[in-house]
Image (cartoon, rainbow, N blue to C red):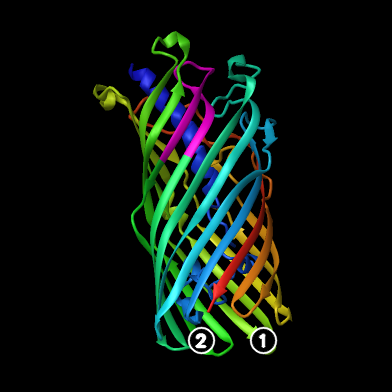
Amino acid sequence: MRSLLFSLALCVLVGAVAAPSTARANPEPPAIYDARVMGMGGTALGTLDNASALFHNPAQLDRVNRFSITGVFTGLAVRLTGAFAGTGSEQESPLIFAPLIFAGGVGRVHERVVIGGGAYIYTGFGGGFENVGCVTAGLTQSCDDIPALRLDPPRSQTVRLFVAEFAMPVQISVIPDRLSLGVTFRLPYGNQSVATDTQSPFTEGELSRADQNVSGVGIPGILAGLSYRPTDDLTLAVAYRSKVWIDMDGETTTELPENLGFGPQATLATKTRWYVPHMLRVGFAQELWDDRITLAGEFRVQFHREANREQAFTLTSEDRTLDAIVPDTVARFDWRNVYLGNLGFEVLARDYLPVRLGFSLASSASNPATMTAFSPPFGVQAAYYTGLGYRADTYTLDLGFSFSTGNDATNAEDGALCTPGDFSGRTLTPAAGCSGTYDAVSYFVSLSASYDL
């Protein structure tokens, strides 16, 4: 029974760790909410003047006259390339689509104070690989050496993860039109699910299907911002986001080999915690040519190295007497800090028609030693942006586009974590860092509308 539970735990977790690494290896899109932000390459700290500032820099809410209501829809499409059976087994996923949504409203309650509320999806991802015919990560043999590792017929390997936040901003003008402070109070919610086939170390070459769904509400956090305008046409801004974590629980169901005699499947109660890291952003926005041109730039650091070292899962059988022998399982990430720089440009082709361009360059949080088929490539990733808008007296409409590509990152050899698992202790580490080439191509389109008085 001990060996069986160890096997179940590892089978489940090898699949489960794929979910967060898919959506979060470079976990936060650099240019969402709103479409103007996307068109300008994610430069938002000193440019926003509507309710979406509560997501980026609540100090910018001093630009709101009486009130502002903003809605944003962003569509994310991603195509991944990864290997389930080492070098030479790379395959491409279909185009995977996920919606990202923002809704917010703010109003002035005093000549120096703005408050409001909003909700948004911080990260969203859905999909995976279709028709995967072989899974060997963590085993040195190929599917030719161990025919039982072949999936016949081939099956899809899917993951889904999203993190949403409910937010309440408060902005205070310390020196009107010159110095503004703001704080957004955040309450996160997360959900992740997975359906994958993984190897069972109980019997070499046996595969087990793992289906997991967990969700939960996290601890509150803040986003603090400051905007300083030394002149009428220059804004200097900084924003800091505190780390939060989300405790999620749910169930994991896994298939059992027939010869074990414990039935066709087992369902285990599952608990885990996910961290959203500290983040620091600094930026500027310079208006030129009688305010017809805006040039903006930012630099961002996301501190994943401290927050996303690992993800621990606790699995509990229905028979509580077995809890003592179910091992702790820890998925290693060892992610790196993300460093991101972006530039944005906007010009008023007409008084009502702004046209935008942007560019960003970012390091990936992914670590070669912990790569999976679902991880975006490690290294440096570039993104390109464009967009336009329509301005009227009380409302604006904006459209933005973005394209980014990875760099065909390659693990030439299996790493130290590319093993089926170690049963000598009370902690199991699922396989990661296996050989293969990994790539990701992303497309964004964003549409936003804002009503302002």
Q: Residue furthest left?
A: 321
| Amino acid, disc 2 | Arg
| Disc 2, SS | strand
Mark 1 crowd level (few <14, some 14–19, many ≥20, 10 Å Cα): few
Which residue matches tag 1? 288
In the figure, 119 relative to 255: above or below? Answer: below
Q: Earlier in the sequence, mark 2 or mark 1?
A: 2
Which residue matches tag 2? 229
Residue occupying image coordinates x 63% and y 84%: 287
Say if residue 42 shows up in the picture. no
Q: Quadrant of the N terminus?
A: top left
Q: Nearer the viewer, residue 76 or 339?
A: 76
The spot of residue 239 in percent (x, y) is 46, 71
Residue 195: give its label.
none
The spot of residue 187 in percent (x, y) is 38, 57
In the figure, 170 relative to 82: above or below? Answer: below
Gap in angstroms between the C-alphas marked 2 and 1: 15 Å
